[in-house]
Image (cartoon, grey):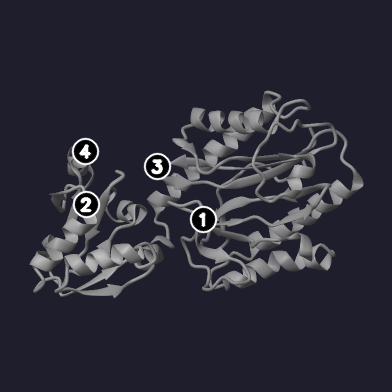
Amino acid sequence: MLVSDLLNIRYLTGFTGSNAALLVHAADTAADETRTVFCTDGRYETQAAAQVPELEHLIDRASVAELARRAESRSATYRRVGFESQHVTVDGLDELSRTAPGVELVRAPGLVETLRLIKDESEIEALRMACAAADRALAGLIEHGGLRPGRTELAVARELESRMLDHGAAGPSFETIVATGANSAVPHHRPTDAELAPGDFVKMDFGALVDGYHSDMTRTVVLGRPADWQREIYELVATAQAAGRDAIRLGTEVADADTAARDVITEAGYGERFSHGLGHGVGLEIHEAPALSQRGAGTIEAGMAVTAEPGVYLPGRGGVRIEDTLVARADTPELLTLTTKEFVIL
């Protein structure tokens, strides 16, 4: 298997540089394991020696092509080579075919991603730390009056990201969403100079990056006395989110988990205002398999890390999303984002 996606290489080897490829041999014996080869360029020679000490190293800037040449030169060993067809471009495949004409190239999409679906305890601990950094950042923001009329969405977003760094994050896990007033009805609004105002919903979707693993959390608060419609949709989304969380059980179809939350919102008459899936997998990528949606496929398995994030969005008025990161366990899912989901009024 010729692995070219850097996140998949990181998952398999621990290497964190920006250029690498990996030729993995399906080992039948201990001796066969020496046929797996790692390649990077000269910038990372020392780093690779520390992070990938157990494999043979090749040094070449064109890492994928160099491993294709290795496969061609030893085609008796590497007769059939899978490649990550979901990541390799058409031109990239042409280059592989020219470089290794004596090797049968086989499309092998998603093999490493399938392994990544189930997190081990070290991965879950990294996710737990990332979620804790986000929880603490939001707590500090609120405690020090960071959510107040007159502040801009951009200022709040920057403070959240700064506070996550203060609590051990390497950076934000994605571009922080802060949306006030009518902007909160836009599911993926990008922060602007819009100012927070009394009576506004303020929706914050953010996460921290720790050891390469991403957290994801959304909380929605209101500034000042809430209107009746705000209480109504907040309570509705909170009820739907609880139903979605409870449905994340081993053996449950991912589409059924989505349905559990969606039915609550639909029965209240807001089905058209819930415009995305219940959630998604999270790990080395902020969005990865499985997709908890009506089009998702597969079942919940122990060790899957997923989000539960239903929302109701009323254009021109405002919207609510409540999101947690959870890990599927044998009994009940483990909640990693611990900030309260009570209706917070500031």
Measured in 3D between alpha carbons, the distance from the residue under mark 3 to the one under mark 2, in whole angstroms, is 27 Å
Q: Position of residue 110 (x, y in %)?
A: 39, 67
Q: Which residue is mark 3?
A: 211
Marks 3 and 1: CB-CB under 8 Å? no
Q: Which residue is mark 2?
A: 62
Q: Which residue is mark 4?
A: 43
Name the amino acid type tagged 2. Ala
Q: Quadrant of residue 219?
A: top right
Measured in 3D between alpha carbons, the distance from the residue under mark 1 to the one under mark 4, in whole angstroms, is 30 Å
Upstream in the sequence, badge 4 or badge 2?
Answer: 4
Neighbour tally class for label 1: few under 14, some 14-19, many 20 plus, Cα within 10 Å: some
Neighbour tally class for label 2: few under 14, some 14-19, many 20 plus, Cα within 10 Å: some
Asked if residue 33 can be seen in this view, the reply is: no
Q: Which residue is mark 1?
A: 287
Q: 272 and 251: which one is in front?
A: 272
Name the amino acid type tagged 1. His
Name the amino acid type tagged 3. Asp
